[in-house]
Image (cartoon, helix red, strand yellow):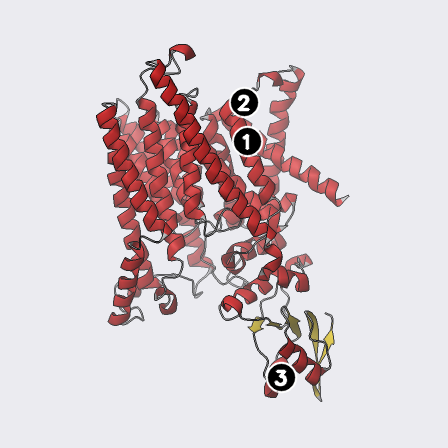
Amino acid sequence: MNVIISILMTAAVLCSMWGLVLLTRTALKLQAEFIPVFVCSAIGCWVYFCGLAGYLFEGSAALLIAGLVLFLLYVIPVIRQRGYGRFRPSLFQTVFAVGSLLFFHLLAADKLIHYDNFSHWAIVVKQMLITDAFPDAGSSLIDFKNYPLGTSSFIYFICRFVGNAQEIMVTAQGILIFSCFYAVFGIVREKRRFLLYAFLAAGCSVLSVFNITIRISNLLVDFLLPIYTLVLFTMAYWYRGEIRKACIAVVPVAGFLMIIKNTGIIFAGIGLIYLVYVWLSHRGKDFWKNGAAVLLSIAGASMTYVLWTLHMAWGFQGVENKFEISGESAGSLSVGKSGEEINQIISLFIRSVFDLSSRPAMGVVGFHAAAVLASVLAAVLMKKRWKLWKALIALDVVLAGYYLGILGLYIFSMPLDEALRLAGFERYASSIVILFAGGLVLCAAVDIENSFYYRGDVMPAYRAFKSVQSKDRYQKGIIVFAALAVSLLMSEYNGMKSIQRNYENTLPYKVYEVTGDRWPYGGKVDESRYLLYASDTDGQVTDYYLQYIAKYLLYADHVDGICAFYQDNMENLLSGYDRLVVVESDRQAKYLLKKHFDVSGEEGIYQVVHSEGGVSLVMGQ
């Protein structure tokens, strides 16, 4: 019965989203490739606003019902008129759908592994699903309360009706990622030029190389930030002749981007600056009206960030937040760091940025070389003046500004121990390199499209090439780029599959096997005091990885970890806890637990029984 209900609810959510897609297509007449990301972003923003207003579930349910009504209103007449035969997907749409389904097949069987899933992203979604409310200042399970709830809101909408499994959370975020990739292909004007699709597919596949540290099989948002910005670039360019339509298209996308992460405001700002540039570059009789529309769209998109800022100011007074820069710290270089420590941070930062053995540095150098070489070859061989070099300069400015911003984060905001080891540097750097590379790929695709001798959309297929030789080069180009895209995507696919096969060797799996995944009715946090025992392999106890996993799975806020027992302190240690959870046992632990408490010491949960004579352990919860 549960399976049938789950299938029905999944169908309801998909139909509801499709109803919203049909409304967007009919009412706004947006480019087909832009509609999925527009709708997903609008859903995320709507749920986010409802959450801020205190109506998270009610607003989500209303949206689901509205989407279903729209779906029926659009679909019933089509069925009656037997007009469904008019839907004929293009070759690109078919290939994209098949490729996406392969990855969704993997995502639908994925589990959370990465540290940050348990320290923030997943635990926030779990609390929202249990309580049907945003976390507040008293949410003891949430350590980093200032992280915006954009993606969490969208994932909540999907999981609230489909199910709360980790696989569904990951699949929901996958919908956002693939809707962005689909939107990027909207930059192609000549729909019959499959070379352009093959080139973009290869370029988008290369971006996955810089996301390999986290991949897409988790809830981290560092990959979403740059690809959402690429969507803003694509929309602004496509509607460069219809600025007001561009303004409509970017509002939910930019608004959602601003609440994906704290740094989302930076990435959204980059995309919106490009929108302003497009407006200034295309002067016409409605120049000032278009300018007003641009300003209104920026103001509308910024409402999500403004409301989050007010939400934090009013609801979280006195709460210490991660990476929060105060006025005092911004005006002083000390910030708890000495001049020598700041010099150490700057020195390490410079070495890391220019370390050619690192993936981000290799990407920057490689794409610089590719852009320069492509521009020279286009000028020499084809006598074409590509605009790629202009994009390279603009993106270099963005790259430099972003790196300076990261450096400021380490100096002014990040705790000293994290700053001295540049915690998270590779992820932060990979995000901007993905934007840098993706921007060049988009510009190169436009340059290639403008280099064709004939416009393919106005010429018959047999006359769309200057010569037989140019057609031969065109066909070989398709083969090369398609082969590159398939190779890189298969590498990503196999990497994700390898992670899945190795899941039983991971710490989250070991903890789950002992504790299970608890979803308490009514949202009450488990107030029991837990002590977890495991080895400190790769620092999994000392860096709090074990504890965060246990917090998520147990839905408990008082969780400590230990990697060794000391004979003289056994009873005193356990007297401060209600449960002992042995995640990874060893001979020493078994010996001491058997000696002092007459229990086996095998993996499991032991109840700590307090009495006047001391403490004892009983196997079981």
Residue toward you, 451 or 487: 487
Return the disc, 2 or 3, that comes first in the chain's sequence: 2
Return the disc, 3 or 1, that comes first in the chain's sequence: 1
Name the side, left or right, on which 20 lies relative to 377.
Answer: right
Give the CA separation, mark 3 to mark 1: 58 Å
In this figure, what is the number of numbered marks? 3
Residue 461, given in percent of the width and then of the height, sits at 42, 12
Q: Amino acid at mark 1?
A: Ala
> Which residue is found at the position 33% from the left and 15% from the top?
454
Residue 283, given in percent of the width and then of the height, sits at 25, 26
Note whether residue 481 is visible: yes
- State whether residue 64 is above or below residue 559: above
Disc 3 target residue: 570
The reply to whether callout 2 and callout 1 are in contact (CB within 8 Å) is yes
Q: Could you say which disc has been placed on residue 167 in the image?
A: none
Disc 2 target residue: 89
Q: Residues within 10 Å of mark 1 (few under 14, many from 20)?
A: some
Circle 2: element type: loop
Q: Quadrant of residue 611?
A: bottom right
Give the CA separation, mark 2 to mark 1: 10 Å
Give the CA separation, mark 2 to mark 3: 67 Å
Disc 1 target residue: 97
Q: Amino acid at mark 3?
A: Met
The reply to whether callout 2 and callout 3 are in contact (CB within 8 Å) is no
Return the disc, 2 or 1, that comes first in the chain's sequence: 2
Q: Residues within 10 Å of mark 2 (few under 14, many from 20)?
A: few
Name the side, left or right, on which 587 lies relative to 448.
Answer: right
> Which residue is found at the position 27% from the left and 62% from the top?
346
